Image (cartoon, rainbow, N blue to C red):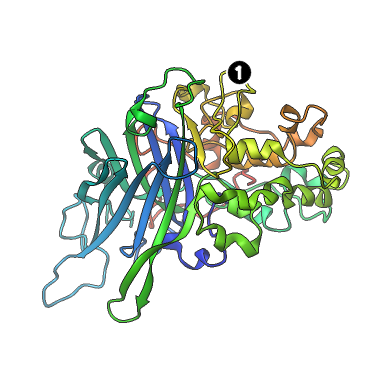
């Protein structure tokens, strides 16, 4: 998973668990950047009567670094408020007591609203208050037209657009395969343990998530409000990450009383870092840290344990990687470039280098225009599409395949010319033995992505959503 249940403690606190982060130049408004931070992962659509929601006691934040030091120059804070409909003397136990057609309907008994605050060099200001979230998608009996509620919950505030609420999870991965001792189903013949050969599945099919999405003018995010026109402009790349924080003290009463300073309990920049790179004993600590301090974790990027496991679990498939990693003096400058410093101009038309400071952030070069949906390659830069991951991250980018290829050494030759990648490194896919590369091809796996804000599909409903079944997606 990108960051679903990635650390022992945060897995027990789903409303503060950041699961995916996306940042990309908006395809339908290329003078803006869209950032989406997902929380509350692995939601079963029929999970009532107390359906999923953001935490009123959690501070959600999105950070932007625009001067390449790994510290925040701009912060957007999101705080949520839950209000119960006044039922009078006959209180109702249900989420809704009739159809919900408008966000203000009294038939919806538990509403959420949110406030947005921006902090930057000019101070702190409240951007908007009492913005309404949509309800969870209970089912067609309760909500006959969910799409209309999505539209009502998209809020234009000056030059900004905001949305916060339930969405279909657009991330795809075969969790059962990967976490069962690292079997990659397309490479079953080479797998040491020779498990049962089966088609891959999308373990997140038909599950929902809660998204915080915002669309912001490029000038509101870049250094000195610049509008870079060329990808080589040093101001063209911004770094993005998201966190969740809780107050330091809680008094267990009814209601709970929270007090004290906010303490960070979750964070996410690049996908799969805490999941795959950081060792278990450091995962919860990593969640509390700022990207500017990520040099302390360099050893885990230089000697990733997953690379060693590939050599053990797929004996003979990666001999060149095995020989390279056997020399403890060999580090992984390729992983540093992709995940910690940004990529220097090694590829035509692309770079997102932010200097030597090692910091886990999604790095987005805002001067690289979006690729038309029909021409987009879900392998991003690896597939020749410079508008995709690791240039930020679009909602449909196949980040599992991209990072598997990187860990297996597919990009190492670009920075260590003496290294020749093993052939399987170029073939590692997370969606079956033949890699789909177009967005349209993902529809076969139960995935769809709207072409406009908030770019993730309406949530699966609790009445009719299909059960998760094998669909050929192999994490």
Q: Quadrant of residue 236?
A: top left
Q: Give me the residue at 31% from left, 52% from top.
A: 78
Is residue 172 shown left or right of residue 125? right
Q: Give me the residue at 45% from left, 21% from top.
A: 369
Query: What SS does tag 1 mark?
Result: loop
Q: Quadrant of residue 66?
A: top left
Report the label total.
1
Q: Kindly give the residue lying farthest to the bottom in the view shown.
A: 253
Residue 334 in the image, given as x and y percentages of width and height: 69, 36
Is residue 74 shown left or right of residue 347? left
Is residue 118 shown left or right of residue 210? left
The one nearer the camera, 216 or 327, is 327
Is residue 6 shown left or right of residue 224? right
Q: Give me the residue at 31% from left, 46% from top.
A: 119
According to the picture, the residue beneath numbered tag 1 turns out to be 348
The one nearer the camera, 317 or 186, is 317
Question: Does residue 83 lie above or below 194 as drawn?
Answer: below
> Residue 431: in sight, yes or no?
no
The one nearer the camera, 432 or 471, is 432
Question: Does residue 40 lie above or below 250 as drawn?
Answer: above
Crowd around label 1: few <14 · some 14–19 · many ≥20 (10 Å): few
Residue 344 in the image, given as x and y percentages of width and height: 61, 27
Residue 210 in the image, given as x and y percentages of width and height: 39, 52
> Residue 311: in sight, yes or no?
yes
Residue 277 in the image, given as x and y percentages of width and height: 65, 51
Question: Does residue 206 lie above or below 88 as drawn?
Answer: above
């Amino acid at each position: 998973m990108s960051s679903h249940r990635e650390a022992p403690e945060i897995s027990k606190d789903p409303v503060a668990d950041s699961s995916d982060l996306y940042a990309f130049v908006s395809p339908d408004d290329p003078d803006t950047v869209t950032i989406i931070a997902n929380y509350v992962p692995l939601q079963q659509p029929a999970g009532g009567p107390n359906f999923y929601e953001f935490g009123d006691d959690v501070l959600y934040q999105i950070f932007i670094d625009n001067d390449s030091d790994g510290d925040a120059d701009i912060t957007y804070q999101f705080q949520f408020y839950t209000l119960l409909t006044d039922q009078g003397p006959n209180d109702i136990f249900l989420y809704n007591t009739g159809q919900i057609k408008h966000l203000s309907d009294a038939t919806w008994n538990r509403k959420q609203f949110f406030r947005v605050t921006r902090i930057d060099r000019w101070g702190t200001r409240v951007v908007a208050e009492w913005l309404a979230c949509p309800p969870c998608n209970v089912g067609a009996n309760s909500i006959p037209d969910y799409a209309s509620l999505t539209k009502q919950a998209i809020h234009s505030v000056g030059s900004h657009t905001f949305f916060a609420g339930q969405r279909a999870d657009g991330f795809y991965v075969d969790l059962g395969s990967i976490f069962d001792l690292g079997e990659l189903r397309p490479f079953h013949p080479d797998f040491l343990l020779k498990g049962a050969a089966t088609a891959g599945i999308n373990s997140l099919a038909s599950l929902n998530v809660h998204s915080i999405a915002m669309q912001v003018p490029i000038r509101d995010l870049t250094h000195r409000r610049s509008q870079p026109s060329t990808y080589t402009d040093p101001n063209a790349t911004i770094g993005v990450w998201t966190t969740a924080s809780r107050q330091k003290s809680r008094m267990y009463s009814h209601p709970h009383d929270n007090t004290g300073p906010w303490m960070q309990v979750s964070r996410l920049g690049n996908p799969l870092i805490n999941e795959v790179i950081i060792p278990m004993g450091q995962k919860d600590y990593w969640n509390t840290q700022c990207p500017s301090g990520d040099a302390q974790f360099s050893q885990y990027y230089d000697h990733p344990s997953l690379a060693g496991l590939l050599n053990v679990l797929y004996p003979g498939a990666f001999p060149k990687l095995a020989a390279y990693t056997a020399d403890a003096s060999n580090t992984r400058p390729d992983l540093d470039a992709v995940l910690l410093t940004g990529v220097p101009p090694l590829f035509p038309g692309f770079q997102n280098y932010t200097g030597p400071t090692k910091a886990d952030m999604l790095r987005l070069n805002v001067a690289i225009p979006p690729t038309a949906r029909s021409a987009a390659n879900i392998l991003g830069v690896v597939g020749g599409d410079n508008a995709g991951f690791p240039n930020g991250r679009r909602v449909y980018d196949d980040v599992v395949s991209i990072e598997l290829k990187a860990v297996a050494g597919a990009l190492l030759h670009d920075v260590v010319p003496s290294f020749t990648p093993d052939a399987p490194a170029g073939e590692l896919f997370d969606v079956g033995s033949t890699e789909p590369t177009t967005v349209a091809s993902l529809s076969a796996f139960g995935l769809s992505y709207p072409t406009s804000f908030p770019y993730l599909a309406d949530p699966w409903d609790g009445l009719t959503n299909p059960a998760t079944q094998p669909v050929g997606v192999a994490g």
